Image (tube, rainbow, N blue to C red):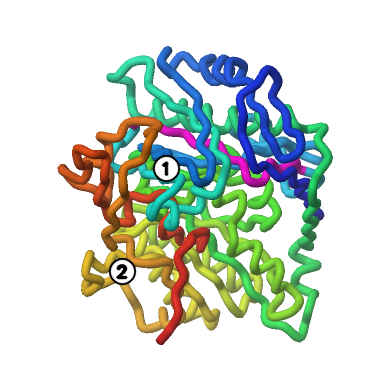
Amino acid sequence: MRLELHRVFVNKLVFGDKTGVRDGILTVNKKELLALISEDELLGKNLDIDVAMPGDSIRIVPVKDVIEPRWKIEGNGQIFPGMLSDVDPVGEGKTLVLSGAAVVTAGKIVRFQEGIIDMSGPGADYTPYSKTCNVVLLLEPADPKMDKHDYEAACRMAGLKAAAYLARCCAEAKADRVDAFEHGNIREAMGACPELPKVGYLYMLQTQGLLHDTYLYGVDVKKILPTVLSPLEVMDGAIVSGNCVSACDKNSTYVHQNNPVIADMLKRHGKDFNFVTCIVTNENVTLADKRRSSGYATKLAAMLGLEGLVITEEGFGNPDADLIMNCWKAERLGIKTALLTDEYAGQDGASQSLADSCVEGNACVTAGNANEVIVLPPMKKVLGFPDEANVIAGGWQGSLAADGTITVELQAITGATSELGYTKLGACTI
């Protein structure tokens, strides 16, 4: 498989008569985009669209998802398969990417499990989305009593439609850079680099239900058994976020599109190891489902003759059990593992970091302590509903001060401790 990402770099957003991109400036026809997302009868009449640029004194709250605008310009399948288009496989051909731009959906869904993006100030240092040029969709339900699942789906589709619309309107733009990726089929991969260890990526997706969902080709991942997926399919939009979990380690659709674990493993393929494949698995609620998925995922790894697995988690607490179960089952099959997670070690950092552990889990990378407290100074402009700072996870009643200052844990900041490593935090051993 060969995938080309045709990147058009965006460094500024403006509203104008025609949506398109030129000289790094993405012009958005606000009226046209607003009409597009307003077609969904589940969304209210008071929808709005605004822009937030890096360095602006702007706060976005509460944030649900972040999506990178893309459009398929050549090859099989279409963008966001199973969501906006048919279910033909992706991962090949040419895809236009508006690099540096993002669509941010903001609205009160589950409330306590949405997040904050500050475009400047100390909060901006903790979220990667302070550096993207954000088209912000301010969403409300048509009926305040609407079922939360229906409203989440409406918000999810609005974000995907907006991202596809922006990129489609720029489909004729000349790419500033083309990144090409190739990855062989299993037969080719198994025979490649015989002198190097065979390594795979076990990709855990949040699927606990109750609006803790992720979608693969439009299928709710909690309904599947673990499956093999080309890393190029992930890079080409096969996975979409639909979950409302703590903002700090929620893997937004943007992060799935730009998964840094996959990007780094592709770079090191043929040098440090033979990157054979991705195995996508779910995070379950019941013990039986955890045992089934972990057993099946590690069985696939063993059947493929993998000698090593990189395992990433999404969320914390209950999913820690899935992470550790995947770890010790793989290790007992003779497969070495490296884990990527974050920590909930208390505001003083003295509490147990994970809800579960095992002796085999001795190679672990941390994305930071989500309980660390930060003070966010007031911004000149707030997009959304600032009072939500008092109820979102990581905040508490009184987090929002009268002058607009917010005191919260990193848990409330979108992407602050991403367990895919798409974060601005770093760590070193001392």
What count of labels does the image hold?
2
Residue 308 visible in the snapshot: yes
Circle 2 is placed at which residue position? 354
Q: Write the residue at 31% across / 69% down.
A: 354
Q: Secondary structure at mark 2?
A: loop
Task: From the viewer's side, name the closer residue of 213 and 115.
Answer: 115
Residue 63 visible in the snapshot: no
User: Which quadrant of the figure has residue 267?
Assistant: bottom right
Task: From the viewer's side, name the closer residue of 322 and 269.
Answer: 269
Q: Write the residue at 36% across / 59% down.
A: 319
Q: Write the residue at 31% across / 42% down.
A: 378
Task: From the viewer's side, name the closer residue of 26 and 242.
Answer: 26
The residues colored magenta run: 95-108
Circle 1 is placed at which residue position? 243
User: Which quadrant of the figure has residue 190?
Assistant: bottom right
Does 2 sit above or below residue 330?
above
190 lies left or right of 410: right
296 in the magenta segment: no
Q: Write the residue at 69% across / 70% down.
A: 275
Q: Quadrant of the N terminus?
A: bottom right
- Magenta-colored segment: predominant secondary structure: strand
Does 260 sit above or below residue 124?
below
Q: Amino acid at mark 2?
A: Leu
